[in-house]
Image (cartoon, rainbow, N blue to C red):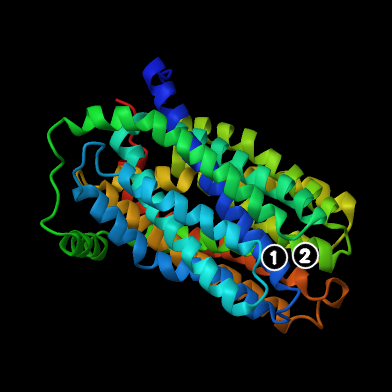
Amino acid sequence: MSVRPLEAAERRTLAVLGLPTAALALAITVVTTYVPVIAKDFISSTTVIGGLIAIEGVLALWLPLVVGSWSDRLETPIGGRLPFLAAATPLAAASLGVLSFADSLGVLAVTVTIFFVAYFIAYEPYRAMYPDLIADDIAARAQSTQAVWRGAGTGLALVGGGLLLAAGDELPFVGASVVFSLAMAAFLRVAAPRAHARAQQPPRECADSVMEQAENVGALVRHDPALRAYLVANACWEASLSALKTFVILYIVAGLGKSESAAAGIVGGVALLVLPAAILSGRLADSYGRIRVMRLALPVYGLGLLVPAFTTSIAVLIPVMIVMGFGGGLVMTLPYALLQPLMPEGRHGAVTGFYSLSRGIGTALGPLLAGVAIQTLDGTFSGTQGYAAMWLVCGGTILASLPFLYALGRRAEERIDPLPA
């Protein structure tokens, strides 16, 4: 399959669209990675800590679908998407600032909930801008570009946040609040004139109400086996990522006995591998097919994630880290590109909400399953205080997704990866 080069206008659009990805990735990585670290000072149960991060998944079961559908219908001088980003930005930034002073389970629970609400209010309309503005024949490359931005934000959160954490528990959250605010403000300033021009075009066709549009998506899922297979597969991928983000710093610090700054370096090194992996996986997917690339890479990635559960040997873990970096880039890049060709016209916001519904199932289960595994298998993995058990969840959920990925390929391969004419 030949790959056409990107046009100059497409490159500019991808560059502008990438900035919120970095900002949102940085913010949510700081919350999901460092809230467990500060919570460990006054919460002994890893199950409770996992439950805190699982709030993201609980909200994702319904809030993204409503917000995404609403953004399909909203008409303003700057379009239907940007007003949500403008409203959510100060709320998310303020909650990040408050997290820097949290010293009890109650304060953490309330503030984390507010942050996740703001995150979804911004993220769903933003994510729906991709199918609005990007042609399907460059969807995988668009997602690889977005994954580079996401990897940059995630890497900055992991490396910078880890170094700041070593200097003070509050500093990662203060730093994230400042960077997030500046990045989102810059995007809104650049995007608003473009959105204003687009808003002058004829409005999109949409359902009569937000709830009707959400119900229509439910009907689509019920009658589309491909979407059902995607729902489960993507939930498994997100469960793996969320379990990893929630407990990886504690695994390195509490489990392996490394310093917080060393943990930042280790995790940051793996995060840097995500960037070239995201670029490569997008090009491979556009050239050879998104499903085929996922089928070949995911079994290796899933098995690789199981290795740290059984060894702490650096000689073994270094090559495994390379596998983790590439697999992480793949899982961050291609899932949404798999979904985009399955979206009915005029339902981009609503089906983007469906995407986050599947993510929500994973982000609710991943931290909880990992927290339970750590607490339950503390004796079995006593050498790491139980934290090595998290890798069973990280790798197991990737491997569990494979039957659903194969089912998705059988039912929708011609829609996702059509043969060249």
Q: Position of residue 351 (x, y in %)?
A: 29, 53
Circle 1: element type: helix
Q: In the picture shown, does residue 384 fall above or below 156?
A: below
- 347 relative position to 392: left or right: left
Q: Position of residue 419 (x, y in %)?
A: 34, 33
Q: Identify the amino acid type marked 2.
A: Tyr
Q: Nearer the viewer, residue 420 or 183?
A: 183
Q: Position of residue 200 (x, y in %)?
A: 16, 30
| Residue at the image position 30 percent from the left and 54 percent from the top | 68
Q: In the picture shown, does residue 339 fall above or below 110?
A: above
- 114 relative position to 133: left or right: right
Q: In the picture shown, does residue 170 fall above or below 51?
A: above
Which image quadrant is residue 99 in?
bottom right
Circle 2: element type: helix
**Residue 404 visible here:** no
Q: Are marks 2 and 1 in contact (CB under 8 Å)?
A: yes
Looking at the rendering, in which quadrant would you find the C terminus?
A: top left
- 368 relative position to 257: left or right: left
Q: Identify the amino acid type marked 1.
A: Phe
Crowd around label 1: few <14 · some 14–19 · many ≥20 (10 Å): many
Which residue in the protein does label 1 denote? Answer: 247
| Residue at the image position 44 percent from the left and 29 percent from the top | 16
Crowd around label 2: few <14 · some 14–19 · many ≥20 (10 Å): many
**Residue 96 visible here:** yes
| Residue at the image position 38 percent from the left and 46 percent from the top | 85
Which residue in the protein does label 2 denote? Answer: 251
Point out which mark residue 284 bears. Answer: none
Looking at the rendering, in which quadrant would you find the N terminus?
A: top left
| Residue at the image position 70 percent from the left and 39 percent from the top | 272
